[in-house]
Image (tube, coloured by chain):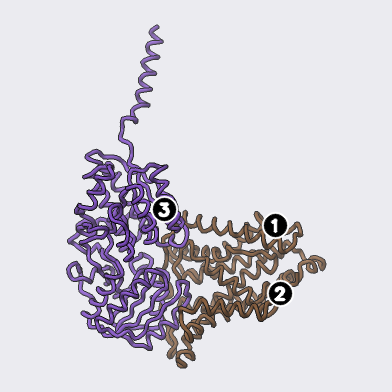
Chain colours: A purple, B brown
Amino acid sequence: MIRRQLFGIALGSALATLAMPVWAEDPVKIGYTMARTGLFAEAAPSQENAYALWQEQVNAAGGLDVNGVKRMIEFVSYDDESDPAKSAQLYERLITSDKVDLLLAPWGTPHHLNVAGVAERYGFPIVGNTAASVAIREVQPGNIWFPTSAIPDKIGPELAAMLAEAGVGSVSIIANVLPFSQENLAFLTVALKAANIEIKMSENYPPDISDMTPLITQMKSAGADAVLALTYPADAFLYMGQARELGLKTDLQFMLIGPTIDAFNKAFGPAADGVVTLAHWSPAQSDWPRAKPFFDAYVAKFNQEPDYLDSALAYMSAEILTQAVAKAGLNKDALRQAIASGSFDTINGEVRFDGVQNSVTPTAFVQRQGDVTELVWPKSIATAPLK
Amino acid sequence: MLDIILSPQLFFAAAVLGSLYALIGLGLNLVYGTMRLLNIAHGDIVMLGAFSAFWWFTLTGFSPLLALPVIAALGAMIGLCLYILLFRRQLAQGLDPVVIEARSLLLFFGVSVVIQNVTALLFTATPRAYRHLDEVFRIGDLAMTGSRIAALACSVVLLIAMLVFLKKTLFGIEVRALIQHREAARIVGINVEKVQIVAISMGFGVTAVAGALLSMTELITPFMGFRFTIASFVVIILGGLGNIKGGIMAGFLLGLLEIYAVTIFSAEARSILIYGCFVLAIVLRPQGLLGIGKKA
């Protein structure tokens, strides 16, 4: 009899121990897709790394604050194979089948635009990040927001203004035929003409170009004050190496996308000094106290610098989500309201939304100066003068 | 414009590009010529060579040029493994070459997907690059980066070595015989399997070396190989399928076309010009520049 009682006590204790995890908070399931294969796979890691860093930091601090209760973050993610249509399908699956609590954005403008439709259909708010096209203004506001200020119709006039102030009288332009470069070229051409900056040469090139010697030779002959290379990463790399080989010297060299990726600076070191490129974030900006810690944490975790555009934007979107969830919890309506009307403290300073767009962060440019990437335009957020 | 066209700078650029195309095409030609295997994972072997050079340089600090024999051996091993695992039995069955080609296309497609994704899983898709031999040397108006000089020199040396091997050595003659007529080679007592093994090893090894040379000037990612696959097929078809010398000529021709067509017309028209000329060449001379290297 005593043995039976002892056995019962032991069994009960074991069952109680097994049942204990049921009393802990369930993790918050956050879903997203990422271009892990396909055309955009080279660009996407910088964004997914930022997500991974954010998850690690939040979980290390006890979890995501959901209305005062901390819950660990669990990702549910899929490879969208760089296919925007597939991305939209997978987001639908994340919402309806995986029943995630929150969503993070995929990589790239076409993906964002496709996923915006899903967000609208299910009333599921998403803070976007790596989308930069005038097309984002055609998205129905209310379920997706875009923190970037790198929109082509702003980039053109700001770049022209910066060039004019720097005393640049003429430019040579080469542009990748891919959409973002071409969208920027259209607005830039108009802005340069308005600023009375002569366009001495303007040539497009295909994304699979293997050698830019002819183009750069023509640029040298044109003899413009500045060179504007509307590049993607692979061709930025090709351009930089060959411009250096051919001794292309101008007052200013601008590359659209490429110089902010870690591999670019590793490849060119001092040769990249002075290159201006598109970005609105820098760890050198002391007015944004979160900026340098993010930079340092990213370098410590991944042994490479974050991309000053994609990594920064991805992390910003996660910060916005963190602060919105802390205030509104997981209720979609409350979350939508919190994001649409809130003010957020991010690694890029304050972010607020007017409709779908960030109404605070200005369109900006950075320049590699020695070992530091400084914000050089606009002067309101510049950390160093343009050299 | 004329002074630009006649400049030594353009010729140097064409020579560098052409030599790398020729080397990459040579690798594919060795595999196709001896076994009629359509390796559409060819560009991925270039990628693996590039990654090998990157990691060698990053981990040891030594020049990737010192690692070329090792990288060639790694490429050769990959070729050998694929041969043993996927193709040895099929080739031994004496199947129609058309059937071999079709099956190899599908198999190599799968191999390509696996190679790309395993590499992305192991190293992530984050672009890599490194700085090596980046000094610029000038002779008059000609400027040459050290890495491009090295790529040109190594490519040319390797191409010449392969041509000498194929022409002057007994084994090279056996390779040429197998390319020319498979059955006749078997009848005269050539150990076909041995030749196939060496050919696929050499083909993959040479391709991996091309990747290592490219790594000094290109952004390295797991998905960088596709355009080299396309270029290599253009080269071997233009030069004549299985024709080693033709393929080498076609490689240099492609380099010249790419540089000078862009100079004379525009960079935007590059793809139209290159593939337009390619189509025209096939229409006018379907057997390739130097004819088909083997009869069916």
Of residues A242 and A340, the one drawn nearer to the viewer in this rendering: A340
Q: Which callout, 1 or 3, points to the residue nearer the camera?
A: 3
Q: What chain does badge 1 belong to?
A: B
Q: Nearer the viewer, mark 3 or mark 2?
A: 3
- Whole-Å distance between the Cαs marked 3 and 2? 49 Å
Q: Is residue B32 above or below residue A146?
A: below
Please name the residue that numbered disc 3 is placed on. A88
Q: Is residue A20 above or below residue B153?
A: above
Question: Which residue is painted at 33% across and 36% down in the image?
Answer: A26
Look at label 1 and name its amino acid: Arg
Residue at image position (23%, 53%) is A340
Q: Quadrant of the C terminus of chain A?
A: bottom left
Whether marks 1 and 2 lie on the same chain: yes
- Callout 2: chain: B
The residue that disc 2 covers is B293
Q: Chain of mark 3?
A: A
**Residue A230: horizontal and vertical position, in percent?**
36, 74
Q: What crowding class fits label 2: few (fewer than 14 Cα within 10 Å), some (14-19), or many (20 or more)?
A: many
Q: Which residue is mark 1?
A: B88
> Does residue A306 show up?
no
Q: Earlier in the sequence, mark 1 or mark 2?
A: 1
Q: Quadrant of residue A288?
A: bottom left
Task: Give the residue type at disc 2.
Answer: Gly
Whether residue A139 sits left or right of residue B232 in the image: it is left
Q: Are marks 3 and 2 on the same chain?
A: no
Q: Residue reaching furthest bottom?
A: B2
**Amino acid type for the residue under numbered disc 3:** Ala
> Foreground: B137 or A353?
A353
The quarter in which the N terminus of chain A is drawn is top left
